Amino acid sequence: DSGVTQTPKHLITATGQRVTLRCSPRSGDLSVYWYQQSLDQGLQFLIQYYNGEERAKGNILERFSAQQFPDLHSELNLSSLELGDSALYFCASSASELEAFFGQGTRLTVV
Amino acid sequence: QKEVEQDPGPLSVPEGAIVSLNCTYSNSAFQYFMWYRQYSRKGPELLMYTYSSGNKEDGRFTAQVDKSSKYISLFIRDSQPSDSATYLCAMSEGNSGNTPLVFGKGTRLSVIA
């Protein structure tokens, strides 16, 4: 158990809908990262938050947004969903750039 | 050219074999190099990390970094069926936490008993 909790584990939704994925980082970790994993693209970095502030941005679509709350949990919001958004979404937390601890992921299926 | 290239495999070896997994990269600013292991339907877990060039050994696992060639390797000795997983290399510039990890696509390894 990495100590990072992601909910829900599975999500099935229709195209055009909006969903929210939740992540609770390891106790004491200030950094939270979101990654998208698909078969053809591998693990793609989306966005990083550090102590409530956006720290780095990767290949995140404008339809996607995230935030980190004062208690350090984070949410990833995906809107106007398309079939191609179906993937595994991972949250990771870290105390340094040397180690990132991943949650079990949320498997999103858009139908 | 992607920043990090990794042969996706799949790679199938008999139990007890030595496994060699490799990644190449293009960003010369990468300083931290990691290997993650991901079992099916699980999140990636950190196996090893190294800083700059050189070797690091941990039990049956050895990580090598050659920054001059922009090439990193993970060797698994006496491979076991429990080593069957996808192995992902990851790299970071290590700029005080401002640069996230960049991952390879992963190599799927099967160790056959």
Image: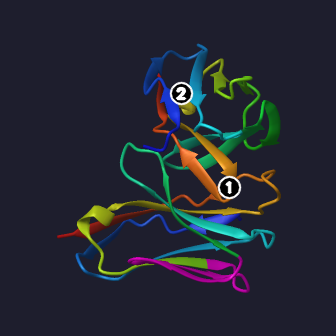
Residue farthest along the front direction in this orientation: A28
What residue lies at 68% left-to-right and 48% top-to-bottom?
A: A95
Instruction: Quickly name the residue at label 1.
Output: B101
Q: On the rendered image, what quadrant is the N terminus of chain B found in?
A: bottom right
Q: Do marks 1 and 2 share a subunit?
A: no
Q: Nearer the viewer, mark 1 or mark 2?
A: 1
Label placed on residue B62: none
Determine whether B64 is above or below A1 in the image: below
Percent from the top left, x then y, of residue A3? 50, 39
What residue lies at 41% left-to-right and 44% top-to-bottom?
A: B42
Percent from the top left, x then y, of residue A59? 73, 42
The quarter of the picture where residue B50 lies is: bottom right
What residue lies at 29% left-to-right and 80% top-to-bottom?
A: B78
Is A100 colored magenta in this rendering?
no
Q: Is residue A8 left or right of residue B82?
A: right
**Amino acid residing under circle 1:** Leu
Percent from the top left, x then y, of residue B46? 51, 58
The quarter of the picture where residue B29 lies is: bottom right
How many discs mark residues in the rendered view?
2
Q: Is residue A103 left or right of residue B28?
A: left
Q: Is residue B23 left or right of residue A96?
A: left
Numbered disc 2: secondary structure: helix
Q: Which residues are magenta?
A: B52-71
Label placed on residue A83: 2
Alpha-carbon distance for marks 1 and 2?
Answer: 27 Å
Q: Magenta segment, principal secondary structure?
A: strand
Residue farthest along the left direction in this orientation: B113
